[in-house]
Image (tube, rainbow, N blue to C red):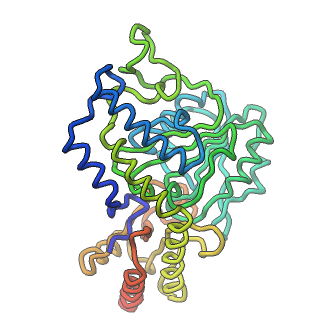
Amino acid sequence: MYFDNAATTIKKPQELKDKYMEIFENSNYGNQSRGGHNKSVNAMMAVYETKKALSKLFNTKPEDIAFADNCSFASNFVIKSLVNENDHVITSTTEHNSILRPLYQSKAELSFVDFNENLELEYDKLESLVKENTRFLVINHASNLLANVNDLNRLHDFSKKHNLIMITDIAQTAGNTPIDVSKYDNSIFLFTGHKSLYGPTGTGGIIKNGDFDFKPVFSGGSGIKSFLKTHPAEFPTVFEIGTSNFMSQIAFKGSIDFILNTGVENINKKIKELTKRFYDGIKDNENIKIYSKEPKGDYSSIVSINIEDVPSSDVSNILDEEFDIQTRPGAHCAPLIHKHFKTEEQGIVRFSFSYSNEISEIDEAVSILNELTKKA
């Protein structure tokens, strides 16, 4: 039973597999935007078709999407392109290292909003963090540990009030939670393909809603303006450097088509049902400590636990080796959450569910956990 979907979904739709087979069998795709011959043009147009599918999913325009290898590349590109040393940035203690580390490297002044006992952001404390040089709100839509889903409308209203650029990590929600990018002007969204978008690894990117003064942070072949000594600053070229993973980007459309045909709302409904069933099955077990939001209202497909004081790695290894249940132990690249809970040493065991999981798997895992805790 695979319950590590917050890291990577491994059950991919047939549409993705079919698209890959088409690519490899037909040999119709050359190096996109690196020539005028028909196979190069085929690749360029096929990548654009994937952007069109993504634009339909997120209610944006294809030309406002830049591809990157994953959310970590996307966040590094955007933060290092826009954030300066003299800026002040508001972010949260629930961020992934793919956000935190580029922010630390920027040497900008940082202020952190924490989360409360209900594992929700302390929205009422945002105002107290604003300074004269505050320029950005950098925040996730959902953390990879707490099962919280942050209120984008509220965060955007705050950003708009203070004329901030909102940069949002949607790695955990893209594909399983409805997101209408058009509602959030002066905002940038960072996504990855290999999680709940059910795409291949090596895919992801940047969605912008507004005009931004992006500066190149990495240089190389661009296919345009080749006689410039600096990399072109036009979006998306500023971030799409060299020969991309275009075959996976083309195949990625199969995954997006699956989501569009299935319906994000239907996907969201099922994973909420799975998550709530698992949570309810273990919540009364006195030997299990839960670190995730109670499944009410908006919540993601994550339940994070520990069994008494047993190291999370031991629990995860037992589940894998004895019961063929795959989970994620450790720090989850979320160091500030673990400092909050004082679980730096023990870590946490994360269960994360997908549309491909079934109720029978949930019930079996609950039964196994409840039996295990009798021996803890």
Residue 182 lies left or right of residue 309; in this view the side is: right
Residue 358 lies left or right of residue 340; in this view the side is: left
In the rendered view, tell whether residue 157 sits above or below residue 119. above
| Quadrant assignment, res 166 | top right
Total marks placed:
0
Residue 104 visible, this angle: no
The residue lying at 42 percent from left, 16 percent from top is 224
The residue lying at 34 percent from left, 26 percent from top is 242
| Quadrant assignment, res 214 | top right
Q: Which of 200 and 252 is in front in this view?
A: 252
Q: Nearer the viewer, residue 293 or 29?
A: 29
Q: Which of 37 and 213 is in front in this view?
A: 37
Q: Nearer the viewer, residue 21 or 165?
A: 21
In the rendered image, the residue lying farthest to the top is 227
In the rendered view, tell whether residue 185 sits above or below residue 201. above
Where is the C terminus found, in terms of image quarters?
Answer: bottom left
Where is the N terminus found, in terms of image quarters?
Answer: bottom left
| Quadrant assignment, res 340 | bottom right
Residue 116 percent across, percent down from the top left? 68, 65
Residue 69 lies left or right of residue 300; in this view the side is: left
Residue 3 visible, this angle: yes
The residue lying at 34 percent from left, 69 percent from top is 313
